Image (cartoon, rainbow, N blue to C red):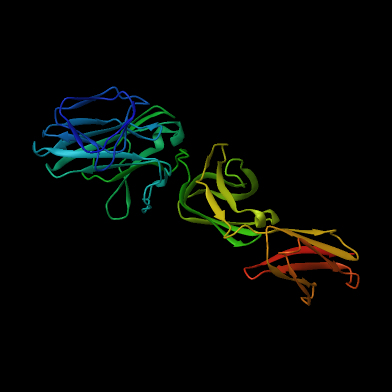
Amino acid sequence: AATTLSSDITVNNTLTLNAKLTSSSSAKPIIGASGTISGASASNFVDGPLAMTVAQSSLKSLTFEIGKGTAYRQLALNVTHSSATSTVYTAEVFNSAPTSRTIPSGITHISSIRHYNVTKGAGATVSSATIALNFDTDDLVNQSSSLRIVKDDGAGNWVNIGNTFVSGVPTGFIVSSSFTSFSDFVLGNASGGTNPLPVEWLSFEAARINENTNLLKWVTASENNNKGFEVERSFDGKTFNRIDFVGGNNTKETVSNYSFTDEDNDLSSASIVYYRLKQLDNNGKFSYSEVRTVESTSAAPVINVYPNPAKTVLTVAVSGYTGNASLEITDISGKKLTLPTVDFRHESATQINISNYKPGIYLLKMITPEKTYTRKIAIQ
């Protein structure tokens, strides 16, 4: 059965995995220098950090049977030390974009859905090391020759550590060239390559502007083959519908800023609205952003105005609000035609005599102590 560790455990013989083993920074398996792991599979792996020990100066191969969630992503590390001093390495995979860093020349973009972290404990000095990363279909690899491993240099930059071997596309593994320091690692696409690797999102935000308007903003660090974004909205968090399309920049190695304004009368009566972006490639592939929500500070009242257009009498019916509200009609010149205050604690509807108003388009405002609600009306 799946198990969650409550403290560190040291394994000097064999750790047999027969289900998922969930670990944390303070509760992880530590494989000793003579220890091994068996039984790993797509459903049997360590979800979280896994530590392994090296106590030799000759080449040592470590296989980290790790994953995150339902994604099993085996990581292999080959290290050569300057001495046989015992040294512990810890590896973990994350289903998220790594911290933003400067992308080097020759790399167009990096993956935004997965990155890896490997740390080295105190002990021997590393003479050389290589790493092999496993990838699957959701990593969107379609060209082995342009796939690269990129690592953090510790100074806010990504460094290309190459590709000495790639096995399998779209599922397989890639081996890096030699390096001597440890940090974050991520898949990258070389210039001229065609690996989509999902768009690298820097941010995606959604906020309420007023009762009928929400503003969406998002930023990409880089794009490759990006046709654009379908903006999708949901009022229940389950069923999403496309409401518009925002064109992308195809391939771009620098930051891009996007925004979209959602204006809809339906927003005024929604206590919460859900948004997501469907990023489309020119070749038909797509991926989704995370979901963002916009909540109303309080549920807006439902205001029905009828008939609309009207000739002599206009009825304003309100539900979801109990209190005093003043009504106001403004014509296209901006002239305000103030009406009596209505006590909606006792009245659910009120009628307005408009027989003396000239035909045209007007704005009806319901003004409460908290906010103002606006409806467009036509008078014939």
Labels in figure, total: 0
**Residue found at x 86% / y 60%:** 309
Q: Is residue 103 left or right of residue 33?
A: right
Q: Is residue 323 above or below residue 138?
A: below
Image quarter of the N terminus: top left
Q: Is residue 245 above or below residue 142?
A: below
**Residue found at x 49% / y 47%:** 223
Residue occupying the far bottom of the picture: 335
Q: Is residue 264 above or below residue 37?
A: below
Residue 240 appears at what percent x and percent y? 61, 42
Residue 215 appears at what percent x and percent y? 58, 58
Q: Is residue 18 left or right of residue 200?
A: left
Q: Quadrant of residue 193?
A: top left
Residue 244 appears at what percent x and percent y? 65, 49
Q: Quadrant of residue 172?
A: top left
Image quarter of the C terminus: bottom right
Residue 340 appears at what percent x and percent y? 78, 74
Q: Is residue 198 above or below residue 208?
A: above
Using the image as rendered, state which of residue 138 and residue 143 is in the foreground.
138
Using the image as rendered, state which of residue 209 and residue 324 is in the foreground.
324
Q: Quadrant of residue 94?
A: top left
Using the image as rendered, state which of residue 66 and residue 198 is in the foreground.
66
